[in-house]
Amino acid sequence: MSTELRRLRNYIGGEFRDAADGRTTEVVNPATGEAYATAPLSGQADVDAAMAAAAEAFPGWRDTTPAERQKALLKIADAFEERAEELIAAEVENTGKPVGLTRTEEIPPMVDQIRFFAGAARLLEGRSAGEYMEGLTSIVRREPVGVCAQVAPWNYPMMMAVWKFAPAIAAGNTVVLKPSDTTPASTVLLAEILGSILPKGVFNVICGDRDTGRLMVEHPTPAMASITGSVRAGMSVAESASKDLKRVHLELGGKAPVVVFEDTDIDKAVAGISEAGFFNAGQDCTAATRVLVHESIHDAFVSALAKTAAGTRTGMPDDEDVLYGPLNNANQLAQVEGFIERLPAHARVEAGGKRVGDAGYFYAPTVVSGLNQDDEIIQKEVFGPVITVQRFTDEDQAVEYANGVEYALASSVWTKDHSRAMRMSKRLDFGCVWINTHIPLVAEMPHGGFKKSGYGKDLSAYGFEDYTRIKHVMTSLDG
């Protein structure tokens, strides 16, 4: 007996629509490996329509007062709370994440982030007015950039959508947002919620694949393109955007070093690092998956980490005892399996290293030791529940190994020595350095990296300012 698939639709100019040419793609629940919906496979006509709707809505939304934009965002935050169970159900179907963790670890931060940007809407800062030339007064205006083309990833579909639309809309921009082709369900629900609050055309959603995203970035209408995704995708967006000098905001991959010194409490460090490495199946650009341990405690640390990994469970969304669910899709499962299959002879799998079950895309919590700095699994992003461990001899070598990758998003240092922690936070070439913790984020602080992890900031006043432009206005005082 076949089950009828739910039909997801684009949201353009205040209306839900199918793709103009009727093309669709199946959406698969990664916990079961079975399709549950179809989504539009949007093409040029759909991108044109969405951009036209956003462009038409922009002048009116730009000219609203900060207080009006704040009020709208606060209503959106309230609606998120009121419809939390619907959002959780959509996100769990999207991703296979544990229901309980989605309820406690995603809904509250998203609501808080929307409320933060609601407040930021009324705090646009610029230099004070003044006379820098006799008889002339200068002022600085901060203005929205215009239509924003935004592409969200599949690891945190709802939260990353919030990180994109909230600052853009707060600043007075209009948005065309594309979710990943594997996780459109929660974003389509967001469109329903935001569409009931915002003027039509301010927020638009189009579903599709990489080609859809390419059409969005290449389109002449957007003034800015923002993407969270792989380094390859970010480089492609930057190249496409350069053709008409669009502003670009990129949050890309990561390979976070976790530097553990000899004075660290091993049990506390292992507990924090394992949770930060395996949470969300390691599908997090900031995940604590590359651990560097001082040689004097290396063996004890590896033993404790392997034991913790063996006691960590993955499983179905309704299982309250699991830390994480499946990998997002079949391709990602194959990627993680490939890294383990290609391990060099000197590497040792201390725990896991295998698929779990024969349905869905589950992978066991995995620990790999005995690795060298130039090994593939050290240099490349796995994006799965795999923690690698290397040994180092002194602080200089720890810094060399930590910085010796092409990514520069996040890092952490574990030590009781305050001076050492301060030295390391200066020397580590990463956009975030945690000390004796790993992975917490707050709306008030910026998130973003260097090197091939991209540029631009999410969250914080810095992330808000990324969606504005600066204009100098000078006026004569003599009439």
Image (cartoon, rainbow, N blue to C red):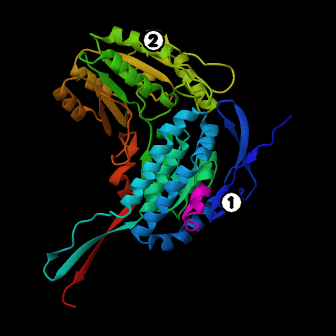
Residue 194's quadrant in the figure?
bottom right
Give the residue displayed 22% in from the left and 91% down from the top. Answer: 479
Whether residue 238 appears in this view of the structure is no
| Callout in the foreground (1, 2) | 2
Relative side of 339 to 391, left or right = right
Residue type, mark 2 in image:
Lys
User: In the image, which residues are magenta?
Assistant: 191-204
Within 10 Å of disc 1 (Cα), the crowding (few <14, some 14-19, many 20+) is some
- Is 194 a magenta residue? yes
Which quarter of the figure is the N terminus placed in?
top right
Secondary structure type for disc 1: strand
- Name the spot of residue 300 as percent of width and height, x first: 34, 9
Residue 208 versus residue 451 in the image, above or below: below
Residue in the foreground of this view, choosing between 25 and 404:
25
Q: Which residue is mark 1?
A: 16
Q: Is residue 136 left or right of residue 400?
A: left
